[in-house]
Amino acid sequence: MRNIVQFASALILVASFAFAQTPQPAPTFAPFEQWKSAVLSGDAAALKSFYSTDPPAQVQVNLTKSGADTDIEFWLALKPRSMKTHVVRNEPRHGHISYIFHAEVVPGQPYGPTISVTDDQSWQQQGDQWRLISVERTDSPKLRQPSDMKKNIYPADADARAEIKEAAEKAANAHKRLLLVFGANWCFDCHVLDLAFQRPDIAPILVANYEVVHVDLGPEEEKNADLVKKYEIPLNKGIPALAVAESDGKLVASQKNGEFEDARSLAPEFLVAFLNKWKPAQ
């Protein structure tokens, strides 16, 4: 009997430990849930009330900028039968709530396949009402989107100069170039790019031709300013930002127009073409 009791106690302990270790879901954000309800019910007036008019809500869809009506019309046209959402980020940032989610939407009419959407919403409290001041929506993304932003891609205590020096020595010995990825852990697109670098059609190109160094810009994009200047990174164009250099430090290429800033909307072919273009001559 003692053995049975001990065994039962052990099971309870294990179950309790497992329960304690289970990640808890992100806290809900009531304005988003109300917005989602308006989408599901097709309530045009209610949905429109969630978009700021002063200042006007800024909307970007797959790299194309537009206004609130574009986003409202998109969701109403779906007439979704169901909408499963997964929260990636729900936190205050620069005076607003940054709410990023993935949605799997089953459209109503016309009937069609499930639609995948990544939506990056910025909510601002205006009086007693929360409203959307900006939306960056990516429909049917071609690159894998992160389910969370917990990965420490850019350690705060990393010494970028030392890492570049070490990578340069390796690159010189292996006839490779340096690929410097400027970004920060808070940057959603930096996490998208990190996942893209692990793809089977991209990772081999990186391994064969580049030594990759992640350069942390910090929470306000003020860190490693000397490296930003040296490698001609235009921070006003957004991050992540990439630079390619020879092992001796000579700059080969620096993207000038924010080509990777919206990594969530890129196709893998774009990344493959970039890496092949700037890899060292064989």
Image (cartoon, rainbow, N blue to C red):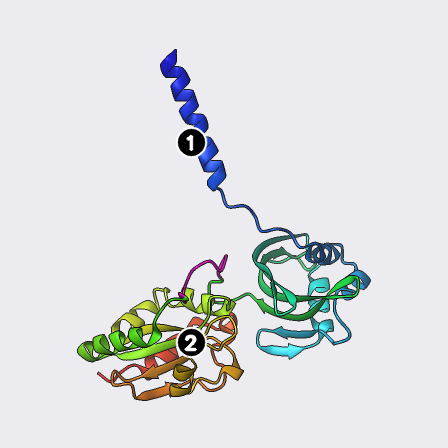
Instruction: Name the kind of residue labelled 2 in the image.
Output: Phe
Q: Which residues are magenta?
A: 146-155
Which residue is situated farthest in the top direction here? 1
Residue drawn at x 42%, y 64% is 195
Q: Position of residue 191 (x, y in %)?
A: 46, 65
CA gap between label 2 and label 1 equals 43 Å
Q: Secondary structure at mark 2?
A: strand
Question: Looking at the picture, how far across and down is residue 180, in whole percent?
Answer: 36, 77
Indicate which disc, 2 or 1, sits on the residue closer to the N terminus. Answer: 1
123 or 73: nearer the eye?
123
In which quadrant of the rendered view does residue 177 lie? bottom left
Residue at horizontal 25%, vertical 82%? 247
* Local SS, label 1: helix
For the C terminus, which image quadrant? bottom left
- The answer to whether residue 129 shows anywhere in this view is yes
Which residue is under mark 1?
A: 14
Q: Nearer the viewer, residue 255 or 75?
A: 255
Main secondary structure of the magenta stretch: loop
- Number of the label disc, if any, that sits on residue 212: none
Q: Is 145 rendered above or below residue 235?
A: above
Can you give x and y, in whole percent of width and height, for residue 101 in the image?
A: 58, 59
Total residue callouts: 2
As drawn, the label of residue 182 is 2
Image x and y of residue 211, in percent:
28, 74
**Three-letter amino acid code at disc 1?**
Val
* The N terminus: image quadrant: top left
